Amino acid sequence: MAWRSFADLPEASRATPCGQPVVEVGDGQAQMVAEMARAAGFCLTTVHEDLTRRARIVEATLPGADIMGLEDMDEEGIYHLRRRLVSERS
């Protein structure tokens, strides 16, 4: 899904099953992007590190969205998530 700014993202996020977009950002931009997400109406933002331990992934949650964490996933789900993240890195 393409978007131009976080102002467009809440509308686009309502079309996703969980209302919780995860975006990869440039090195050094994660905190700024998280602040932009909060300003656009997301109630929870989380910055994650990539495999090189750089803050490069911003997860934003709309009010009322279902939240699922790793603790909610079974081992098979975690395995597939890790595999997917590694394949996207290549």
Image: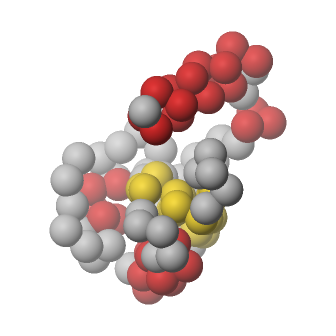
Name the residue located 76 percent from the left edge and 18 percent from the top edge: 75
Q: Where 76 falls versus 89 (above or below)?
A: above
Image location (x, y in percent) of residue 24: 43, 56
Q: Where 88 falls versus 61 (above or below)?
A: above
Image quadrant containing the C terminus: top left
Residue 42 seen by the camera: no
Name the residue located 42 percent from the left edge and 81 percent from the top edge: 36
Q: Which of 73/79 is in front?
A: 79
Residue 1 seen by the camera: yes
Name the residue located 54 percent from the left edge and 31 percent from the top edge: 86
Colouring mode (rainbow / by chain / secondary structure / one colour): secondary structure
- Taking the view exactly as shown, the residue that stands out farthest to the top is 76
Q: Is residue 41 left or right of residue 45?
A: left
Q: Is residue 89 left or right of residue 72?
A: left
Q: Where 34 falls versus 50 (above or below)?
A: below
**In the picture, residue 68 is in which quadrant?**
top right
Q: Is residue 42 left or right of residue 5?
A: right
Image location (x, y in percent) of residue 67: 63, 48
Image location (x, y in percent) of residue 10: 34, 65
Image location (x, y in percent) of residue 56: 52, 61
